[in-house]
Image (cartoon, rainbow, N blue to C red):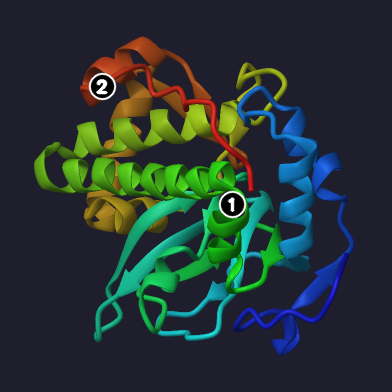
Amino acid sequence: MTGTVETGRTVSGRPVTVSGPACRDCPLRALDLFINHTPEELELVQSLKRGNVRLGPDQSLIREGQTDAPLFTLTEGWAFRYKTLRDGRRQILSFLLAGDFIGVQQKMSDAAAHGVDTLTDAVFCVFQRDAVWDLHRRSPTMGFNVTWLTAHEESLVDDTLLSVGRRSAEERIATLLILLFKRAAALQADAGAGGVPFPLTQQHIADGLGLSLVHTNKTLRKLEKRGLHRISNGRLYMRDVRALARLADLYGDGRPAQRPLV
């Protein structure tokens, strides 16, 4: 199912609509990371879907202050949510990976309080703007799933706030690396044995953790010299995940919980 979708600044000023599988055939649903849904639930999700859109790297999916953005599920690629100050300083709120549901926060106000940009080539399922209300009204289970996903997103922001407010630079970066590695590994058949994609620049890391670019560079090099991780050719490899987790003072092992997929 495809259609014209308004998504903010896109390639050549126009969104790129692409065909995609039916909800029941989405490849993500075969992963252990995502819970199974009933045929009726999948039919409901399919009925609210407007199409699929593909964006290239560094494209805006939702602009700060946008009032007409639909809802999205990221199905391929990486993106991030952010806020900016008047002078252009940016705080990255969270990084988005396949399976993340995007745009619910906007439904609680008149305009998007944050923007969403892509890090890589990315594909999104697009849903009508009132899909949240229909999901709650027509299926309490799917309504709860949306609530769960929103709470999960809030917990990621809480982790970022804890890092920015209390962790040292080494602890901040260790936490970010291990959490992103675990999230990305859960989307791979090899569970990260061969590394995971890591499209973040040092500027993205700095903007996500409240660090200067120079401090970010020095800390990444220090951790790599200690044999904790390696970033090479756009991939992240864990060399001593236990030591990195101890340094991060991480609650739990960082492995993402099984979750719904809208």
| Relative vertical location of residue 6 with respect to residue 196 in this rendering, above or below | below
Secondary element at image label 1: loop
Q: Which quadrant of the figure has residue 174?
A: top left
Q: Position of residue 240 (x, y in %)?
A: 41, 13
Q: Which quarter of the figure has residue 242?
A: top left
Residue indicated by mark 1: 78
Report whether 249 appears left or right of 25.
left
Compared across the picture, whether 108 is left or right of 28 comes to left
Amino acid tagged 2: Tyr
Q: Which mark is residue 251?
A: 2
- How many numbered discs sit on the rendered protein? 2
Of residues 122 and 101, which is closer to you in this image? 101
Q: Is residue 48 left or right of residue 88?
A: right
- Residue drawn where x is 55% and y is 53% of the image: 101
Q: Residue at x 10, y 40 (%)?
A: 166
**Picture coordinates of residue 53, whole percent (x, y):** 75, 68
C-alpha span from label 2 to label 1? 25 Å
Amino acid carrying label 1: it is: Trp
**Residue 53 seen:** no
Q: Earlier in the sequence, mark 2 or mark 1?
A: 1
Label 2, residues with CA under 10 Å away: few <14, some 14-19, many ≥20: few
**Is residue 44 at least partly visible in the picture?**
yes
Quadrant for the N terminus, please: bottom right
Query: For the point 31% across and 32% down, which residue is it?
Result: 175
Residue 8 place in picture, x, y as percent: 60, 83
In what element is the residue under mark 2?
A: loop
